[in-house]
């Protein structure tokens, strides 16, 4: 039987960087299980490659703290390893004057988070991004950079394998538990001391084998891109982003120049019907029906989700997609942008099932459940309070992957705001009450959105 001191499920950026940190802490006997034949076939290899710089998140949140720190670490890593990186910064533009207060709020948050940002006027904006258009002022984030996500994964893989302490088993899926501390996998059982759940869009499924995440339902959103046609002239030096739309849990369609010089616009946030539903029908399995049911429930109960569901799918049509993009720039010729091969799924998650007697849906939707569970084993996890105990215990040797409790509960406990907009203004009567309230004035406060 295969053995691992620490078994990491998932070979995306989270799984690889957790393994790297474990190696740095002197750990040995680390095995990474990746169900696909190669790394980077899901979110970590399909994203925009933007190294965000902590400008969106409310100060004092874990995201605010980790985003900028992660930005600095990843920039240093890319330079040290000779990986391509474009330190272009990014501009956030206001599509009209109603978005200026939100821009101001982003500036306040970014400054409080320690990010290097400036509010610039239109003339200064033109020097940074000649094609960007804004209503008076724009935000310039100096620290935002662009990397090649697949090159980062390849480098991490090489480094981990060279350490002699990590084995990466591709084409090998975790399927459940064969016995206490023995994982069942498609290639046979693996006995382990500890298990790290870094399974991305499947992390709730993995967590359920340990008695966790029963309350969560995953809501996948599809991000499609368009790409500048070869030979077309359209200058983007780095990143042009909109002020995030408070009705949308993601950052909005944006222009990004890749480290290889390609210019992408996207991604969308179209509700998808599978965790890997990259095509129209491909990647849909029997879960599609239950996702559709959850979407339907959210559609009728949650104004934010309804707005996303009504606007985003139209962006399958180039005309609708281009409308969003065109509002960020002075000149946009739709014929210059073709549908790109790149498509990604961003998992949103929530405890989306109506609770008996409460009749509320999506009250604790969380845009990135892709968090890491550290578990001692099924019995441990099944014990009441185990998750809470794992979260709070002091384990300096394992600090990098301490389990986070459902962020909604942690934030609620600390009185912090964050997560997707449909959770942000939760009042005493919960999300249902919020949905019934008049909508917040658009642009008044930006959401703490998920990267992308
Ligand atoms: C369209 C899009 C654009 C984005 N843009 C940005 C951006 O510009 N900047 C940014 O910071 N973030 C961005 N993101 C988010 C970022 O890509 C993700 O947060 C990140 O990649 C998540 O990494 P992960 O390791 O958790 O998940 P993944 O990359 O999905 O890795 C999880 C891995 O686990 C494997 N796995 C799942 N189940 C099992 C199992 N049972 N057994 C074995 N293996 C399993 C999967 O095959 C997968 O390879 C974007 C995401 C998308 C989709």
Image (spheres, rainbow, N blue to C red):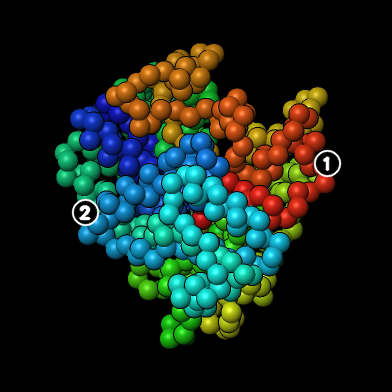
Q: Is mark 2 within 8 Å of ligand 1?
A: no
**Local crowd at mark 1 within 10 Å, few (<14), some, or many (≥20)?**
few
Q: Residue at x 82, y 46 (%)?
A: 438
Apparent side of residue 354 relative to residue 330 in the rendered image (left or right): right
Name above or below for residue 374 compared with residue 343: above
Report the residue marked by disc 2.
80
Local secondary structure at mark 1: helix
Q: State whether residue 117 is above or below residue 135.
A: above
Residue that appears at 32% across and 42% down: 17
Point out residue 303 in the picture as x, y percentages from the top left corner: 77, 48
* Image quadrant where residue 161 sits: top left
Point 47% across, 17% down: residue: 389
Q: Which residue is mark 1?
A: 436
Kind of element beneath mark 2: helix
In which quarter of the view is residue 329 placed?
Answer: bottom right
- Count residues near mark 2 (Cα–Cα under 10 Å), then give few for <14, some for 14-19, many for 20+: few
């Amino acid at each position: 039987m295969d053995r691992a001191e620490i078994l990491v499920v998932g070979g995306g950026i989270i799984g690889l960087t957790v393994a790297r940190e474990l190696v740095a802490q002197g750990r040995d006997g680390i095995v990474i299980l990746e169900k696909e034949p190669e790394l980077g076939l899901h979110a970590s290899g399909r994203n925009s490659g933007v190294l965000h710089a902590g400008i969106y998140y409310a100060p004092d949140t874990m995201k605010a703290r980790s985003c900028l720190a992660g930005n600095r670490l990843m920039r240093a890593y890319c330079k040290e390893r000779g990986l391509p990186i474009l330190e272009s910064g990014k501009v956030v533009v206001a599509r009209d004057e109603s978005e200026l207060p939100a821009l101001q709020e982003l500036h306040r948050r970014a400054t409080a988070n320690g990010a290097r940002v400036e509010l610039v006027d239109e003339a200064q904006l033109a020097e940074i991004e000649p094609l960007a258009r804004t209503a008076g002022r724009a935000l310039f984030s100096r620290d935002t950079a662009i990397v090649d996500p697949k090159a980062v994964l390849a480098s991490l893989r090489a480094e981990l394998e060279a350490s002699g302490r990590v084995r990466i088993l591709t084409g090998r899926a975790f399927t459940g538990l064969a016995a206490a501390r023995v994982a069942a996998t498609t290639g046979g059982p693996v006995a382990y001391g500890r298990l790290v759940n870094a399974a991305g869009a499947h992390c709730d499924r993995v967590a359920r084998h340990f008695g966790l995440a029963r309350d969560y339902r995953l809501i996948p959103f599809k991000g499609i891109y368009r790409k500048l046609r070869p030979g077309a002239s359209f200058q983007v030096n780095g990143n042009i982003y909109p002020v995030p739309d408070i009705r949308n849990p993601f950052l909005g369609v944006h222009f990004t120049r890749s480290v290889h010089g390609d210019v992408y616009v996207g991604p969308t946030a179209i509700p998808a019907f599978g965790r890997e539903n990259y095509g129209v029908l491909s990647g849909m399995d029997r879960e599609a029906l239950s996702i559709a049911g959850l979407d339907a429930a959210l559609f009728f109960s949650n104004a934010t989700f309804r707005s996303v569901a009504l606007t985003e799918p139209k962006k399958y049509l180039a005309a609708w997609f281009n409308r969003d993009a065109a509002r960020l720039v002075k000149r946009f010729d739709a014929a210059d942008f073709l549908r790109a091969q790149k498509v990604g799924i961003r998992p949103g998650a929530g405890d989306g099932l109506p609770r008996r007697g409460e009749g509320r849906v999506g009250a604790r939707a969380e845009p990135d459940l892709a968090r890491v569970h550290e578990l001692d084993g099924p019995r441990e996890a099944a014990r009441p309070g185990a998750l809470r105990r794992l979260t709070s215990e002091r384990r300096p040797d394992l600090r990098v992957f301490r389990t986070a409790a459902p962020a909604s509960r942690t934030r609620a406990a600390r009185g912090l705001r964050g997560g997707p907009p449909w959770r942000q203004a939760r009042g005493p009567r919960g999300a249902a009450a919020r949905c019934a309230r008049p909508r917040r004035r658009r642009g008044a406060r930006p959401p703490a959105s998920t990267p992308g």
